[in-house]
Amino acid sequence: MTALSDHPATLYEPLEHGKVRCTACARYCVIPSGSHGFCFVRKNVGGRLVLLTYGIASAVQVDPVEKKPLSHFHPGSRVLSIGTVGCNWRCQYCQNADISQEREITGRALSPQTAVRWAKRYGCQGVTFTYNEPTIFAEYALDVMREARAAGLFANFVTNGYMTPEAVAAIGPHLDAVSVDFKGSGEAGFLRKYVTAKGPEPIFATAAGLRTRGVHVEITDLIVPDVGDSETATRTLARRIVEDLGPETPFHLLRFHPDYKMMDLPETPISTLERLHGVAKGEGLDYVYLGNVWGHPLEHTYCPKCGALAVERYGFTIASWNLDAKNRCRRCGHTIPILGSLPQDYRPAFATPIA
Ligand code: SF4
């Protein structure tokens, strides 16, 4: 399906001899005429950059917002999740490699207007760009976000954060929340070896830049056993989150499952996650969560002042809500920084593919 593709990109600059420099992600690909960038979806056509995946979705699904994961942003809401093909990283354990590493432009037509119509039809309160890296299709995401905001919906990115300042400036004003996923705790050696990124500084700059623009930021870190579970790396990342974003920033340590080219590693031991949780808490972060460990007590939110159970979770479902109407702890009155509140008529949402 190609009806909406070949859309002009805006995040680029022309160079001499018909080349262009893409300014969407921190790779800053210099692309000769007739060639693609590293992500395969941005192409130089006669000295102009075009986005080949504009309006072509590879996956569309209704999800609970907790699945992103976003634990302090409109809890209990539903989002229309949209992904395309391609990616600017090559994570060796990618759980969506069938779409993120796809080099053919495949999917179904989904105009920004239709995306928002579907979101409303399926009872969603927002749209989320996820499954592959949304920065590479920023121009499409921006048009969906404009439509979404006009319709009263919020917009989120699930991103590796490897953006440029130009992309942050373009996207930030239209975003409401972002889940920034550090791989290997952002340790430079891990990024080079397992995801083909040079280092973490662009990711830190993206998180801070979006935060400065008023975007709600949560940080995740998938803990890969043996090769990406260092206490030192977790400590360094946690310290940086406290310094750059503040101690109230939610931090999610996610359990690894074997996938794609890393099938020979086991799942992350629960004891490793618990140990790293202690490391992150020790650096002063108030809200550290374990993910992909359904039924674990560290999925819940605890009041950092009195220790009371504030929000009880089971996976992506909220099991009990122990905050008052202003999100204050019912025991000690401390305000828990959660945007929005659990709807009175909350019913758990389950991931539902619709295209
Ligand atoms: S989005 Fe990144 S990987 Fe894709 S063309 Fe632009 S700079 Fe290259």
Image (spheres, helix red, strand yellow):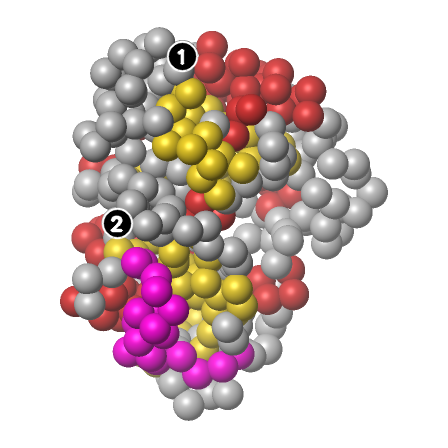
Stretch of the chain drawn in magenta = 107-126
Q: Does the residue tagged 2 have its C-beta within 8 Å of any atom of ligand 1?
A: no
Question: Crowding at label 2, few (<14), some or many (≥20) Cα neighbours within 10 Å?
Answer: many
Identified at 34% across, 65% down, the residue is: 123
- The amino acid type of the residue labelled 1 equals Gly
Q: Nearer the viewer, residue 216 or 211?
A: 216
Can residue 205 be seen at all in this image of the molecule? Answer: no
Label 2, label 1: how many angstroms apart (C-alpha)? 29 Å
Residue furthest to the left in view is 150
Residue furthest to the right in view is 264
- The amino acid type of the residue labelled 2 equals Asp
* Sequence-first disc among 2 and 1: 2
Question: Crowding at label 1, few (<14), some or many (≥20) Cα neighbours within 10 Å?
Answer: few
Drawn side of residue 209 relative to residue 161, left or right = left
Q: Circle 2 is placed at which residue position?
A: 176
Q: Circle 1 is placed at which residue position?
A: 307
Circle 1 — which element?
loop
Q: Nearer the viewer, residue 50 or 128?
A: 128
Circle 2 — which element?
loop
Residue furthest to the bottom in view is 3
